[in-house]
Image (cartoon, rainbow, N blue to C red):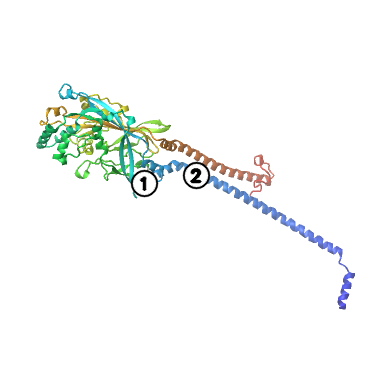
Amino acid sequence: MGTIFFNEINNRSNPPNEFESNTKCNSNEQGEKNSDKEKEPQTKSTSLQIRQRKCRCGMVPLIVSGVIFLAMGLLSVKFTITDMILSERLKMHPWAPAYKLWLEPQPEVRLNVYIFTVENANEFLNGTDSKIKMKEIGPIAYREYLHHQDVVHHDNSTLSYTAFRRIEFLPHANIPGILNKTITVPNFAVLAAASFVNEYNYFIQIGYKFLHKTYSDGLFINITVYDYLWNYKSKLIEKAEELMPSMVPTTNCGVLHGIYAYGPDRYNVKIGTKYGDSQFFQINTVNGAPTVPGYDVENGDCYASVENSTEGAMYRQRITKGSVLTFWRKALCRTVDLHFEKEMQNHNILTYKYTLSPDMFDRKPSNETDCYKGKYGELPNGLTDVSKCYFNMPFAASQPHFYGRSEGFAKKFEGLSANEESHSCFTIVEPTIGAPMIQAARSQLNLVIPKFGSLFEKDYQLFSDMILPMFWLEFSQKDLTAEIIQMVGFVANVLPTVEVALTCFLFLVGFTLTLTAFVKLFNAKWKHLAKNRNINFPFAQRGIKPDSNCDTFK
């Protein structure tokens, strides 16, 4: 305890040296200052590195974004919106607008029937007149409705469907009482039967001669327009059907009854990207065969192909002026080719007009490939055999009033006057999607009467070796609905403008972003050189805020 006390007294008598203590404080403060000075360059260096890193990181997104936009611009040139829309249309998806419009076609299709009546029947029969004077009655207007049903998509990129067609009389578009009007016409039911029998043996001809004397209605008859179209019957034909039912396929010879009364047709067509635009919706088979119904190749018939044709409800996509549109119509009993004629504007939409050549029904150089040359002898140019579609009766089709091919067979008649505007066939198509804007399919049915044998009486001989015009039909589509016109106009006129604008926008944005990044890099580099070397570069300093754009960029 004494020791402790002694030490405490010493401490009190010898206090700490103030100089030593101040020196220590000063040295501590100096050390802290030196430490701050050492840390300051490090902080500035770190800050510089951060700014440089931020600068580089800020330019990379600009360059990447610019490259992406430029790439998108290039892709928009190669793969357009139109390409994508048309590619999807090829697949005929059930949910697509194009499919729904095809399933129940909206454009009005008008069927006009024109009948050739005779004004001098008695004078021709008694020999006073050597020519038959004809007068055209019509049009008798109907509307045709088309429905596509029982649709089946196949794995081989084809589509099968059944086409139902029916017609409805249009009172507002007809002369009042037109169906009840009585007309005088050649009795083509009897004349067709005589022409058919003329190819058979002597005993068949004798039997027909007996029926003619007993039951004939005469070679000219008076009949109402309605009966001529829908309920044309003959006593001779009805009696022949009783005696030889296998030789008389029907007793109702009404011309529209013969076209619409025998059920729908089953089609198989090409769809999908496998076949592309050039073969879109082209026919493979009709009723299971690639030939016109009635032509049986296995039994030796000519190969009358329906392949690569179309019904006319829609055509292939991306049509060119060099394209040939092949059209199939059951009433015509064959396919026909339509060729480009001229460009037209329809609803401010560029369209192509395709027409049927006047020589379409001429004989081919090779008879073996001419399936329509005639069943009972070679037909003259301008006529095509349609007997296979009309119970093997000697019928031939032509253009109305023998348009384009008024040869010797037309000189036996008066009153025929063909002209292009009223009697030619054409279709006006928007070329991108192949939509028919306006079209008219016209055909005339004629009775081909051979040179009668000696067993036939004088009245028959007056008609011997004659091409007798009966009536002609016009299937016309005057215009599209407003909805379809808007859709076609959008694809034809609006989309190309949108595509060009989109491509320009993508290129502009891409170029601007890329250029901005390189300008920033350029300015930063030159400013860095200017500061480090104490050089004044006005173009590098102009408009640049101090320390704002990577001024110490390395």
For the residue carrying disc 2, how many other residues have a C-alpha within 10 Å: few (<14), some (14-19), or many (20+)? Answer: some
Q: Which quarter of the picture shows residue 241?
A: top left
Determine whether, in the image, residue 441 is placed left or right of residue 44. Answer: left
State the image coordinates of residue 394 (x, y, percent, origin top left): 19, 35
Is residue 232 at all visible to an observer of this figure? yes
Q: Quadrant of residue 418?
A: top left
Name the foreground residue: 148 vs 198: 148
| Rendered location of residue 253, percent (x, y) | 21, 35
Which percent across, then down, holds residue 214?
12, 33
Task: Examine the rendering and report whether any part of residue 428 can be seen.
Answer: no
**Residue at the (15%, 32%) spot, across then down:** 216
Neighbourhood count class around disc 1 (C-alpha, 10 Å): few under 14, some 14–19, many 20 upward: some
In the figure, is residue 537 to the left or right of 100? right
For image coordinates 25% across by 37% down, the residue present is 257
> Secondary structure under badge 1?
loop
Q: How many discs mark residues in the rendered view?
A: 2
The residue lying toward the viewer, choosing from 257 and 19, is 257
Mark positioned earlier in the residue sequence (1 or 2) = 2
Farthest right residue in view = 13
Q: As shown in the figure, which amino acid type bears the numbered disc 1? A: Lys
Look at the image and tell me in which quarter the N terminus lies. bottom right
Q: Amino acid at mark 2?
A: Met
Secondary structure under badge 2?
helix
Disc assigned to residue 274: 1
Q: Are marks 1 and 2 in contact (CB under 8 Å)?
A: no
The image position of residue 535, as x and y in percent, is 68, 43
- For disc 2, the marked residue is 72
Left or right of 449, for residue 428:
right
Frontmost residue, 517 versus 152: 152
Q: Nearer the viewer, mark 1 or mark 2?
A: 1
Name the quadrant containing residue 450.
Answer: top left
